[in-house]
Structures are given as structure tokens and as C-alpha cells.
Amino acid sequence: MRRFCLIGPTYPYRGGIAHYTTLLARHLRQTHEVLLLSFSQQYPGWLFPGKSDKDPSERPLQTEAHYRLNPLNPLTWRLTLRQIRAWRPDVVIIPWWHPYFAPIWWGLARGIRRMTPRPQLLFICHNVRPHEQGQLSQLLLPHVLKMVLGQGDGFIVHSQADRAILQSYLPQARVVVSPLPTYAELGEGATVELPVDLPEDRPLLLFCGLVRPYKGLDVLLEALALVEQPVHLLVAGEFWQGSRTSYEAQIDRLGLTNCVTIIDDYLPDELLAACIDRANVVVLPYRSATQSAVVQTAFGRGKPVITTNVGGLAEVVENGRTGLVVPPENPSALAAAIDKYFSQDLERGFSKNVGEGNGRFSWPALIKHLESLTSLEVASASLS
């Protein structure tokens, strides 16, 4: 048994990374001692483009945590380092997903490396690079990554694609690729009615999660206009930055008004589970990705996925077994895959394969990879 200090968002914060942190802490606690340190505040309101960063679920994922960190308040960093030093962990785990958190992670990493005895410092990289970058971000990112991640003793990534990106910045990094684990526990045991009426005479496609440009909803709508099978699309997720009007204009232009239903809101866990259960297939036409919590939520509920060959998605969705994989930004190929899925009645066989293959997406498998990294000598693993 080892002592793990895990840092990151957890309930009451919402979203895939908060869910991930919570589930990792839960499963780590089955075999190790865990101190989970979370945020008193993640973002100032003016920086967050959604309605709220709090989880509205009736039965949210929860676990014991301490709430002190504020990315914009260095005093909380110092107090957190004091708490870590007093607890004397063997390992500290920090998540990486967006450069906004670079200052706080840099400050904590420097403090952790100066501790005696020094715990090992691991980073779990959800996305080495953010999904959407401006020119300034692209220019500064290599320096930020080397400054912050360069202090790590080891790294977990969730796709070979992200491993290649990380090692392009840090060639000597000790990196373990571990598939994103299942989110099957979301909405477990809950039942909820969908807040919209959906047609019963046509199969249902589901596009879910926060609606952002890199996720390719516009590509899916173009494809839907080309699909020969009678289908209906449910778009379930919060539209950020006032983007809904552009998609509604596209729906009108393509004559899809009677083929698309929209739930414009963040989905509580139980509603997300209900949407997936109601759908015949989840469609993720991403332009870019490293991995996707939506895939693992769908797989956790036995649902096949149609997606694109970007990032690590094709490493998870086995083309022709657990779903279909098409080139990105190709409405014709996506439409053909949707037609194939229904015309060849692939749902039942794919669902069976999904259930049989879910073992490789387990939390114990991820924890074994963490344990393999922590067995390394700090001196040999350190990058700086």
C-alpha cells in the first residue's frame, strides 16, 4: 500500500475531468491511501463560457476531498504544499489538460520537488495540447510544457497519439499509455425521463457533450442530409459562446428541421445515461481529439460509436467490431457509415463486442500503470 496525493477537480465541479478524478480516487482507495485535494474555485466567472461549472446531477459521483486550491491565489498554493508536506505522500499526481492551469501546476511542482523526502511526481495528461488554440497559445505552448511538465518523473497519457505529442516536447519523458477507463458509473441506478419527445418510428443518433467547433456537429448535420436511412438526431449538450444560432441556421438550410432535436443544456449524469440508453448509436464526428469520455460513457452502457480517425479515437473504437471509424471532416463518408450501420443491422453485434471488450478500459488497469511508474527510482525517472 502506498500513499497517493491526487490533485484535481472533483464534485461539485462538473465535466469529464472532474468525473475522472473522482473515479480514480475511488478506485485508488481500494488498495492505497489517498489524499484528494481539489479547488475552492476553478475559474473566475468571466473566464467560463458555460452557464456554470457546478454539477447539477441528482446522484453525482462523489468522494472525500479537501477544497482549498485557487489557480489565481498563490497563497492557496503555499497552504496546499504545507498540507502535502505534512501528509508525506509517496506519490503526487497532477492532471494536465489546459495551459490556464500552468502557473498553479508549475508552483506546486516546484514545491513538491523541494520536499524532503521527495514524493514522486506524476502527471496524467488528458490533453497534452488544448483542443482549440490561438496563435499566441501555439507559440507559447512548447515553453509552457517544458517548464511545467518537465518537472514530472512520469506521465500517463490515454492514446499513442498523445504520447507522440508529449515526447515531441520532452523526448526523454517516461510515458505510459493507458486507455481512458470506463465511465459506466455515471448515472448508475438512476432513472429519468427525457425532457423531449422523440420519434419512435426511426432509429436515433446521439451527439452529446459540450458543443464546441472541434467536435464537428456541423459535419454531422451535413452528413445527415445525405443519409438514405430514415433516422433522427438528438443533439444533447450545452452550446458554448452563442453558437446555437449558426447550427440552427444550418439545420434550416439543409431541410433537417423535422430530423433534429436539441437539448441545449449541460447534461446531469442521469440524463446523459438516459440519452445514451435511448440512442441506437452515439456519433462523434470530431475534427481533433486525444480520447473521449463520451466514448467510454457509451461503451460503459454497451452502446456502439461511429467516430472519426483522429487522435486516439480509432485506438478505442474498433472499426467493424465496436463501431465504425471514418475520415474527419468528410460528410459523405460519415453518411455512408450511418447508412451501413442501420442497413446491415450492426447494432446488436457491435453492442455484444463492446460489452466483451470493456475489460481493457478498467480503472484497475490504469492503477497498475500508475503503480508501474511509481516503482521507478526518482533519480532515474526525473527529467530535470
Image (tube, grey):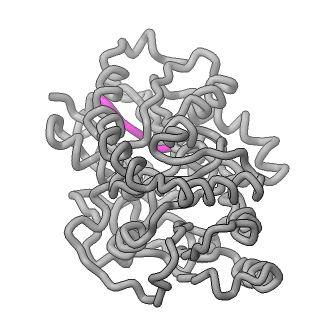
How many numbered dots are placed on residues in this image? Answer: 0
Image coordinates for residue 232, horizontal then vertical, percent: 57, 76
Image coordinates for residue 94, horizontal then vertical, percent: 43, 41
Image coordinates for residue 384, horizontal then vertical, percent: 56, 18
Task: Please identify the dominant SS of the magenta region.
Answer: strand
Q: Residue at x 23, y 58 (%)?
A: 63
Q: Quadrant of residue 91?
A: top left
Q: Residue at x 69, y 55 (%)?
A: 336
Residue 266 is covered by the magenta coloring = no
* 382, 235: nearer the viewer: 235
Whether residue 34 sits left or right of residue 68 in the image: it is left
Q: Quadrant of residue 55?
A: bottom left
| Residue most extreme to the front | 344
* 82, 245: nearer the viewer: 245
Q: Residue at x 34, y 29 (%)?
A: 370
Whether residue 79 is visible, yes or no, is: no
93 vs 25: above or below? above
First to last magenta residue range: 91-96
Q: Quadrant of the N terminus?
A: top left
Whether residue 127 is visible, yes or no, is: yes
* 20, 256: nearer the viewer: 256
Image coordinates for residue 27, horizontal then vertical, percent: 22, 44
Q: Residue at x 57, y 47 (%)?
A: 324
